[in-house]
Amino acid sequence: MKKSDIAMLILIIGVSALLSYFVGNLIFGGSVSKPVDVETVPKVSSEVAKPSADIFNTNSINPTIPITIGNQATR
């Protein structure tokens, strides 16, 4: 290859790189900073509310106790 051929290849590669850079910016756009509203979460408290006395009382049914219905003999 001659020196003029190498210089022409370098010129073509450089022009195509610049052209692809500008076309890429036109298609995909550049980085533009836009303000964004972000929803914030309220602060979580470590306090626990006392449970309702209607549900958690001394007269409520305990579902962990085995129940025997009728007169069943154990095997």
Image (cartoon, rainbow, N blue to C red):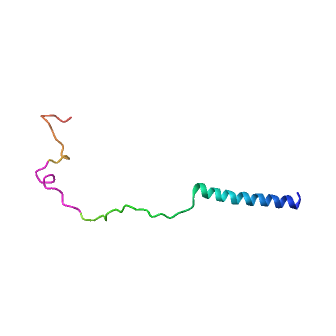
State whether residue 41 is above or below residue 70: below
- Give the number of marks: 0
- Residue 72: x and y in percent read 15, 34
| Residue at (18% x, 43% y) in the render | 66
The answer to whether 72 appears left or right of 5 in the picture is left
Whether 29 is among the magenta residues is no
Viewport quadrant of the C terminus = top left
State whether residue 65 is above or below residue 27: above
Judging depth in this view, the residue of 70 and 73 nearest the camera is 70
Q: Quadrant of residue 73?
A: top left
Judging depth in this view, the residue of 15 and 62 nearest the camera is 15
- Residue reaching furthest left? 59
The answer to whether 46 appears left or right of 70 in the picture is right
Range of the magenta residues? 48-60
Q: Quadrant of residue 7?
A: bottom right
Judging depth in this view, the residue of 67 and 52 nearest the camera is 52
Q: Magenta residues: mostly which secondary structure?
A: loop
State whether residue 21 is above or below residue 68: below
- Residue 35: x and y in percent read 45, 64
Judging depth in this view, the residue of 20 and 64 nearest the camera is 20
Viewport quadrant of the N terminus = bottom right
- Residue 38: x and y in percent read 40, 62
| Residue at (57% x, 58% y) in the render | 29
Whether 51 is among the magenta residues is yes
| Residue at (60% x, 54% y) in the render | 27
- Residue 14: x and y in percent read 74, 61
| Residue at (24% x, 65% y) in the render | 47
